[in-house]
Image (tube, rainbow, N blue to C red):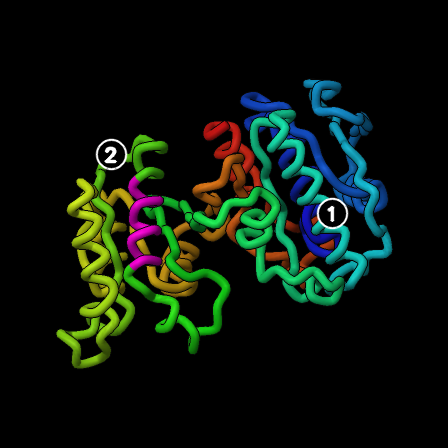
């Protein structure tokens, strides 16, 4: 259920009760009892909580919430980050990851967490991706966002923009191209083109605006081609996203967080899905944050969470 002070509990409940989601999987909420009960009171309706100890005990019935309670702080603060909420959200993820590693569940869908709340709780991870990498012992991974016709893999994720040029290395770019290539086949994407963004405006304009394209990105693309990967670029990012919107591009490899996600969220803010590639488990999430400003008002949209649950069921 993610950070309990945000919209996580509400959208987790709404997704668990969604008919489309229930038609393809048996949802189980991992979390704490108080925010679950508060979320149910918020949305109303006749809903029964089926508290279980193992996913094997889950019921597949309309109006039933399957729930595994985690021993975690319940002193969260609604509508803002708190140490209790940060610690609780970490414990929820740790429990769900363990269930997935043990094959007790086919995949996990994580509601949004707060990096500020995690820091307040002394949990030193910048985000889900890094946390899941640690919990699963997987150093080679990538964040992919899907929405509309776009599928975007990021070379760097939660890093200050001032650090990004130093993180764009031939090795890092090649690794993300390889992961994107595997993901395109996993998802049965029609086009097998892995289109790689440049870092600088106009993809560096032949070195005029920077040498990252010449020294790191282009050599990584050539390495990928020698491995039989249909990698192209480096492309100017502004033109590439336009082409991907109007024609078939298998995957885009973007150099940094906002380069890839501004376009994707413009295309599919309410339905975008985040998939962590390279893990030994299936993990998805909605592509938005905790939305403290609208939390606990009963107005949070669950479409992205529902799509993330459906994607996890498909991949699982």
Q: Let me know if residue 272 is in the magenta part.
A: no
Task: Quadrant for the N terminus, please.
Answer: top right
Pointer 2 local density, CA inside 10 Å: few below 14, some 14–19, many at least 20? few
Assess disc 1: are there few (<14), some (14-19) or many (≥20) residues with their C-alpha within 10 Å of its C-alpha: many
Q: What stretch is highlighted in magenta?
A: 171-181
Look at the magenta stretch and give its main secondary structure.
helix
x and y percent of residue 120 in the render? 74, 67
Taking the image as shown, residue 246 lies to the left or right of residue 61, namely left
- Which type of secondary structure does the marked residue at label 2 adopt? loop
Q: Which of 41 and 150 is in front in this view?
A: 150
Q: In this figure, which residue is indicated by the disc labeled 2?
A: 190
Q: Name the residue under label 1.
A: 91
Are circles 1 and 2 on residues that touch, CB within 8 Å?
A: no
User: Which residue is farthest bottom?
Assistant: 208
Residue at position x 72%, y 21% from top? 58
Q: Can residue 10 be seen in this view?
A: no
Task: Say what secondary structure mark 1 lies in.
Answer: helix
Is 204 rendered above or below residue 220? below
Q: Choose top left, top right, bottom left or bottom right for residue 237.
A: bottom left
Please provide percent x and percent y for residue 141.
Answer: 44, 48
């Amino acid at each position: 259920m993610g950070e309990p002070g945000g919209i996580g509990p509400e959208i987790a409940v709404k997704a668990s009760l969604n008919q489309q989601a229930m038609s393809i999987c048996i949802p189980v909420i991992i979390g704490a009892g108080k925010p679950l009960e508060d979320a149910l009171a918020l949305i109303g309706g006749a809903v029964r909580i089926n508290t279980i100890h193992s996913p094997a005990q889950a019921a597949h019935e309309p109006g039933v919430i399957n729930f595994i309670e985690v021993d975690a702080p319940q002193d969260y603060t609604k509508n803002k980050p708190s140490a209790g909420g940060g610690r609780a959200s970490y414990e929820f993820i740790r429990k769900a990851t363990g269930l997935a590693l043990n094959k007790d569940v086919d995949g996990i869908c994580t509601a949004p967490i707060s990096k500020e709340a995690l820091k307040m709780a002394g949990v030193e991870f910048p985000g889900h991706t890094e946390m899941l990498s640690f919990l699963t012992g997987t150093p080679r991974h990538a964040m992919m966002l899907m929405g509309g016709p776009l599928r975007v893999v990021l070379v760097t994720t939660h890093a200050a923009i001032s650090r990004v040029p130093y993180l764009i290395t031939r090795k890092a770019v090649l690794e993300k191209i390889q992961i994107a290539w595997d993901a395109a086949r996993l998802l049965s994407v029609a086009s097998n083109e892995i289109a790689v963004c440049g870092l600088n405006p106009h993809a560096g304009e032949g070195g005029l605006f920077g040498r990252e394209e010449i020294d790191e990105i282009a050599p990584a693309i050539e390495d990928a081609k020698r491995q039989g990967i249909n990698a192209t670029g480096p492309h100017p990012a502004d033109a590439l996203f336009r082409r991907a919107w109007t024609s078939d591009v298998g995957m885009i490899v973007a150099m940094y967080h906002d380069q890839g996600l501004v376009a994707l969220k413009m295309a599919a803010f309410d339905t975008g899905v985040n998939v962590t590639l390279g893990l030994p488990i299936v993990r998805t999430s909605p592509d938005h944050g905790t939305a403290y400003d609208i939390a606990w008002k009963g107005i949070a949209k669950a479409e992205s969470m529902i799509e993330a649950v459906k994607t996890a069921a498909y991949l699982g």
